[in-house]
Image (cartoon, rainbow, N blue to C red):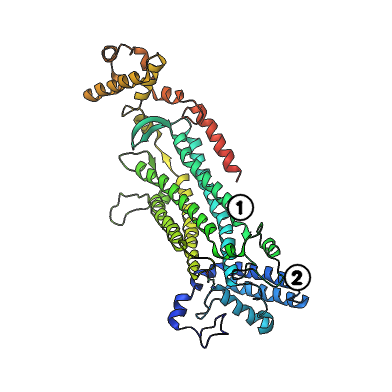
C-alpha cells in the first residue's frame, strides 16, 4: 500500500482517492536532481553538527551518487505509491544506503523547506537558459536592424500611417523591451538567491544545522532571513512567472506585426520556407505559424501567472498544501519558452524585408503633414496655426485624391500665405526622418548610435 513519510500516528495508509489527489510526482520529478543536491548539502551540515560520522557521510554521498545516476538513467523512478519527489527519493536512498543510514538524512529538514529551495534552484537554472535564448532573439533582431541600414517604412499609431521611420528604428523598438526582460531575469535572481533550506517546517531547525552552509553549498548567496517567510512565500516564484508572461507579451507584439506584414495587403516581409508552414488543402498557402504560436502561447504564459497569483491570494502563514500548485505553472512557462524562443529566433533570422515596398508606402497617407507643420513653425508661424494649415493641405489633397507633394505653388498660396514652394524641401521621407535627430529619434545618425548601444547592451549578457 501507499508508503508515506508520516506513518507514525496514522492507523493505515491514505484512501486511494486521497493518494491520487495528493500525488505530485508527475510534475515534481523535474526537481529530482535538485532534491539530491539538497540532500548532499544537508548531509554535510548533519556531519558538521556531528549527527553523521565521517564514515556515514562517505556512505551517504556514495548512496546519493548512485541514486543520482539511477535517476539520470531512468533506472530509478517514482513509484505509483510515492506521494512526491521527496518521498520517492528517500525510498531510493534507503534502498541504496539501508534503513539505518538512509533514515538519518531527514533529521532537521522538512519537505516544506526542501520544496521551497528546490523550486528556486530549478528556476534559477532555467532563468539562465531563458535569458540566453532571449539574447539570441535580440541578436537576430539587431542583425536585421543593422542589415536594414537607412531603409524607411511607414511608422504607425492607431495602425494608421503616422510618420515615416527607419525600419531599423522600428526593429530596435522591439529589442529594448526584450533587453529589459533579460534585465528583469538578472535582477530577479538577486531575490531568488536566498535559500529556504534550514527553515524546517516553518520554525527553523533545532539540531545545530547551519542554513548558511547549505545555502553556500547550493550556490545561493545566503539563507532566507525568516524561516516562516522561507517556507510560506512564493512571491519569488510569482515574479519569475510575471517575467515569463512579459516575455510572452513582448514576443506576441512582434508576432502580430510579422503576421500583418506578411499579408498580401502589407507585403512588407517574406518568411523563409523552413520557418513557415503550408496548408493541407490550399496549395498556395505559406503561413506564419511561429508568430501565431508565439502570440497564442502568450495567453498561456499569462494564464500560468494568473493561476499562480490566484493560488497565493489569501493564503495564511505558513506552509499550506495549496503551495504544491506553484510548480506546474512555472514549469509550463519554462517548457513553453524554451521551445518557443529558438523557433522565434530562427524566424527572425530568416525574414526578408521588402524595403522597396515599405519605402513606397512610407510617405503615403499624408505621413509628412507633421513635417509641413514643423516647417511652418521654423518660419515663425505658431504651431496652432501651422497645424491648421497642414491639416488644410491634407483636406485639399484628400478631396482631389492626390498626395501633399502634388500641390502646386498656386494651391499652396491658396491654402495659406505662409506656404511657399520651399515647403517641398521637407516633403521627402529622407528629409523627414533626418530632421528627427534628437536622442532616441529616427534620424539615421541617431539610429546608428542606438544600434551600437543595443549591440553593446546585448553583449554584456
Ligand atoms: N509536495 C509538496 C509541495 O510541492 C511538498 C510537501 C509538503 N507537504 C506537506 N504535507 N507539508 O509543496
- Note whether 223 is above or below 453 in the view shown: below
Horizontal side of 324 relative to 47 (left or right) equals: left
Q: Secondary structure at mark 1?
A: helix
Q: Earlier in the sequence, mark 1 or mark 2?
A: 2
Horizontal side of 366 relative to 350 (left or right) equals: left
Is 356 in front, or is 169? 169
Q: Residues within 10 Å of mark 2 (few under 14, many from 20)?
A: some
- Where residue 424 appears, as percent x and y from the top left, is 36, 17
Is 409 in front, or is 53? 53
For residue 190, the mark is: 1
Residue highlighted by disc 2: 48
Q: Residue at x 49, y 60 (%)?
A: 330
Residue sticking out furthest to the bottom: 11
- Cβ of mark 1 under 8 Å from ligand 1: the answer is no
- Cβ of mark 2 under 8 Å from ligand 1: the answer is no
- Note whether 9 is above or below 449 in the view shown: below
Is any atom of residue 76 visible in this view?
Answer: no
Is any atom of residue 53 visible in this view?
Answer: yes
Q: Residue at x 48, y 83 (%)?
A: 14
Q: Rounded to the nearest whole Å, what is the CA distance between mark 1 and mark 2?
A: 28 Å
- Where residue 117 appears, as percent x and y from the top left, is 60, 64
Amino acid at each position: 500500500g501507499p508508503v508515506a513519510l508520516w506513518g507514525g500516528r496514522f492507523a493505515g495508509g491514505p484512501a486511494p482517492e486521497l493518494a491520487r489527489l495528493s500525488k505530485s510526482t508527475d510534475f515534481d520529478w523535474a526537481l529530482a536532481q535538485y532534491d539530491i543536491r539538497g540532500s548532499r548539502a544537508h548531509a554535510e551540515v548533519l556531519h558538521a553538527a556531528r549527527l553523521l560520522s565521517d564514515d556515514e557521510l562517505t556512505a551517504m554521498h556514495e548512496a546519493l551518487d548512485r541514486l543520482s545516476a539511477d535517476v539520470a538513467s531512468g533506472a530509478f523512478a517514482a513509484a505509483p505509491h510515492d506521494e512526491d519527489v521527496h518521498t520517492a527519493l528517500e525510498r531510493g536512498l534507503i534502498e541504496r544506503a539501508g534503513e539505518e543510514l538512509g533514515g538519518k538524512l531527514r533529521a532537521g529538514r522538512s519537505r516544506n523547506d526542501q520544496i521551497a529551495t528546490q523550486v528556486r534552484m530549478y528556476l534559477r537554472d532555467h532563468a539562465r537558459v531563458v535569458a540566453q535564448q532571449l539574447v539570441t532573439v535580440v541578436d537576430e533582431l539587431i542583425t536585421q536592424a543593422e542589415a536594414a541600414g537607412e531603409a524607411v517604412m511607414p511608422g504607425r499609431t492607431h495602425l494608421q500611417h503616422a510618420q515615416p521611420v527607419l525600419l531599423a528604428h522600428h526593429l530596435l523598438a522591439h529589442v529594448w523591451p526584450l533587453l529589459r526582460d533579460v534585465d528583469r531575469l538578472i535582477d530577479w535572481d538577486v531575490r531568488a538567491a536566498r535559500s529556504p533550506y534550514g527553515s524546517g517546517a516553518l520554525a527553523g531547525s533545532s539540531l545545530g544545522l547551519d542554513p548558511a552552509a547549505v545555502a553556500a553549498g547550493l550556490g545561493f548567496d545566503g539563507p532566507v532571513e525568516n524561516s516562516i517567510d522561507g517556507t510560506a512565500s512564493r512571491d519569488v516564484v510569482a515574479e519569475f512567472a510575471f517575467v515569463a508572461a512579459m516575455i510572452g507579451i513582448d514576443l506576441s507584439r512582434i508576432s502580430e506585426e510579422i503576421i500583418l506584414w506578411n499579408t498580401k495587403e502589407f507585403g512588407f516581409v517574406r518568411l523563409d520556407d523552413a520557418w513557415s508552414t503550408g496548408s493541407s488543402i490550399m496549395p498556395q498557402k505559406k503561413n506564419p505559424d511561429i508568430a501565431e504560436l508565439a502570440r497564442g502561447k502568450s495567453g498561456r504564459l499569462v494564464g500560468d501567472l494568473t493561476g499562480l497569483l490566484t493560488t497565493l491570494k489569501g493564503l495564511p502563514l505558513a506552509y499550506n498544501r495549496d503551495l504544491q500548485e506553484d510548480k506546474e505553472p512555472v514549469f509550463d512557462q519554462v517548457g513553453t519558452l524554451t521551445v518557443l524562443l529558438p523557433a522565434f529566433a530562427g524566424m527572425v533570422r530568416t525574414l526578408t524585408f521588402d524595403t522597396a515596398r515599405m519605402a513606397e508606402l512610407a510617405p503615403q497617407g499624408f505621413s509628412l503633414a507633421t513635417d509641413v507643420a514643423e516647417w511652418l513653425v521654423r518660419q515663425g508661424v505658431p504651431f496652432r496655426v501651422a497645424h491648421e494649415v497642414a491639416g488644410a493641405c491634407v483636406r485639399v489633397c484628400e478631396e482631389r485624391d492626390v498626395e501633399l507633394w502634388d500641390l502646386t505653388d498656386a494651391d499652396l498660396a491658396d491654402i495659406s500665405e505662409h506656404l511657399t514652394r520651399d515647403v517641398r524641401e521637407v516633403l521627402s521621407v529622407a528629409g523627414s526622418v533626418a530632421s528627427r535627430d534628437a536622442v532616441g529619434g529616427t534620424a539615421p545618425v541617431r539610429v546608428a548610435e542606438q544600434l551600437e548601444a543595443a549591440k553593446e547592451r546585448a553583449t554584456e549578457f
